[in-house]
Image: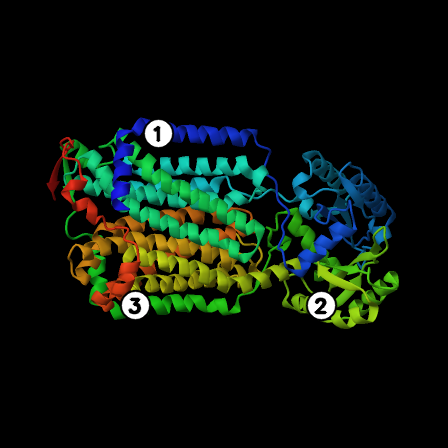
Amino acid sequence: MADFLYRVGRLAFRRRWYVALVWAAVLAAVGLGSLKAPGAVDEEFSMPGIESQKAFDLLEQRFPGATADGATARVVFIAPGGEKVTAADNRQAIEEAVAGMGDGAQVASADDPFKARTISKDGSTAFATVTYKVGADALTDAARAHLERTIDQARDSGLTVEAGGTALAEEGGPGGMAEMIGVAIAAVVLLITFGSLAAAGLPLLTAVIGVGVSMATILALSSALGLSTTTGTLAMMLGLAVGIDYALFVVSRYREERAKGRTPEEAVGMAVGTAGSAVVFAGLTVVIALAGLAVVGIPMLTKMGLAAAGAVVVAVLIALTLVPAFLAFWPNAVLTRKARKSGRIEESTETNGGTRWARLVLRRPIPVLLLGVLGLGALAVPVTGLQLGMPGDEAQPTSTTERRAYDALAEGFGPGFNGPLTVVVDGKGAADPKGAVNSIAQEIGATKGVVSLSPARFNDAGDTAVFSVVPSTAPTDERTKDLVTAIRDERPGIESGTGASYEVTGTTALNIDISTKVQSALVPYLIVVVGLAIVLLLVVFRSLLVPLKAALGFLLSVLASLGAVVVVFQEGHGAELLGVEQTGPIMSLMPIFLVGIVFGLAMDYEVFLVSRMREAYVHGEAPEQAVQSGFRHSARVVVAAALIMIAVFAGFIGESDSMIKMIGFGLATAVLFDAFVVRMAIVPAVLALLGDKAWWLPKWLDRALPHVDVEGEALNRPETRSAADPAPDLEPARA
């Protein structure tokens, strides 16, 4: 591996113009393809195998032409203080508004609240539901603008009018200040780390090119592969973060090799052969973790994982080819200003901050280990109270009309009106379908926790009906989950008596089903991802205990970060500082996201840091001395890489979308815990306690595993390097 990558690096150095032109052509091609491709759309969310999805599929089959996932808008009318919506003037304004909302080619229906009886008991509030023939992604700007104009006209009459639903929901996705903030902080960290504008700018430039290639490819293939507008969010997050980090490690190793007296071309080859090997295996762990999201069985999540994995692959390829090519264009520009002026390159001293930190940990390994484990364990305790769900309009800022509509409905009609259940009755097997539907409705209506039922609506064949059930509790309330379970538990007895079957669906039931499925998939996902990564680390480090220690450390950091998410987003501690308007259940997919993404990133730091220790140990150093050598060479760069990742992820906390905000916070805290507590403290403490045993591997297993030479032993042999290398550009000198 090291020898092959060494040759790749030197080839990229010599053929710098070809490499640069190839990447420019790739970027231009995918960019042109993205411009010509049909726009990305919000794909229909589906999760095969759950009851809610079966009910949606049945609706689409039995009610042809009525799209089950058609966009909706729920418009809430609130009378001025002390008045009622039934007053003549208010009623006229509402009826005119509803008539206006129903006027449109894409509108399927607009329910008059006075006919549908959607008026609160005190008469102060009414709501109208506008249903569209198409999904939110296919709704035209003209249709949205018409709805907004009609709402504004109703407000002019003195009514308070708010609207929620998918029809007015803003498009989420990547782009904006989040990325700019992350890049700006990354630039500062790189400048401090390298002391050179060129060295700081090169990782940023190559990372941006990589993200450009990845995002353009996603856009170009969005229509053909059914990728949604949100698919690129994760790809952009990770592509930017790992793109900067991977280039950072190659540039850092290049400067180190130049300090040893190597020529620019030789230094590039050595950097790609050694640091590049670590980049390849670190990238593989991230790709395994992301591709493993397919185990969960959610098509959207699978596509997001594969798209992000593709972005990581692009980042790896750029680090191995384009970074060496750019170093060939400006071989001395990435060196420090002092080295460029003096013409002498100072090699790093034996003692630096990383060495001093390693010595501190090695002197007190047990206290450091206990402090790190107990600290992360304490942060992980809130996970025991984790509640999963899907935040809705209640998580929106109070400045939005969606949130105000949600609050108005809860106040006027009760919290359950914001999350009605949908019951789909299949009466094909019943002798009297309509009688069976009435019996089912009566049984469900008598269930404790049900406030009201809507009239059943039959399809043209008269064998299928659908009606809504309004719970007494909010969509995210645990009692609502108990109600859904109770209604489903009643099914066997009801079906045997009526001959008809039914399914419970709707947004609330769908969220409950998603949470249940994600929880059941978490353990298999962990087994697959962690198992594959342990095998990969066995090959890299040729040790049994180091991969196991890496996996256990990851579990500590991911549980601690998930605990921090619970504390802020569920319990509300410090929520205001992050702009979290409403606390509640944690997004159902959050544990899977954290496990998958953080595992890959955690293994990044493990590979980069421990591979230098392994390299020193293989070259004859004692275990404790090898730990110090690893920290002397890698600690500063690992810290910089972690700070960059934290900055990139933390930038997404400023997004208005609650899901992206939560993911950004969770990833930022996970990287913080994993890099600075697990890898920088717990890892050296464990290695100090294990000594030589840390690198033990049974002989039979050593013979069975392939040798990949991540340490670059082959590169130290004279025959590996060309004898015709020119003299160094700058004279090396020891500090």
241 with respect to 149 (left or right): left
Image location of residue 61, percent across then percent down? 75, 51
| Number of marks drawn | 3
Most foreground residue, 3 or 24: 3
Most foreground residue, 179 or 624: 624
Of badges 2 and 3, nearer the viewer stands: 2
Q: Which residue is mark 1?
A: 20
Instruction: Please tell me which of labels 1 and 2 falls first in the chain.
Output: 1
> Is residue 615 visible in this depiction of the protein?
yes
Of badges 1 and 3, nearer the viewer stands: 1
Instruction: Please tell me which of labels 1 and 3 falls first in the chain.
Output: 1
> Is residue 185 visible in this depiction of the protein?
no
Q: CB atoms at circles 2 and 3 under 8 Å apart? A: no
Secondary structure under badge 2? helix
The residue sitting at 74% across, 50% down in the picture is 60
How busy is the neighbourhood of tag 3: few (under 14 within 10 Å), some, or many (20 plus)?
A: many
Instruction: Please tell me which of labels 2 and 3 falls first in the chain.
Output: 3
Tell me which corner region of the image, top left, top right, bottom left or bottom right, holds residue 153: top right
168 with respect to 677 (left or right): right
Most foreground residue, 245 or 617: 617
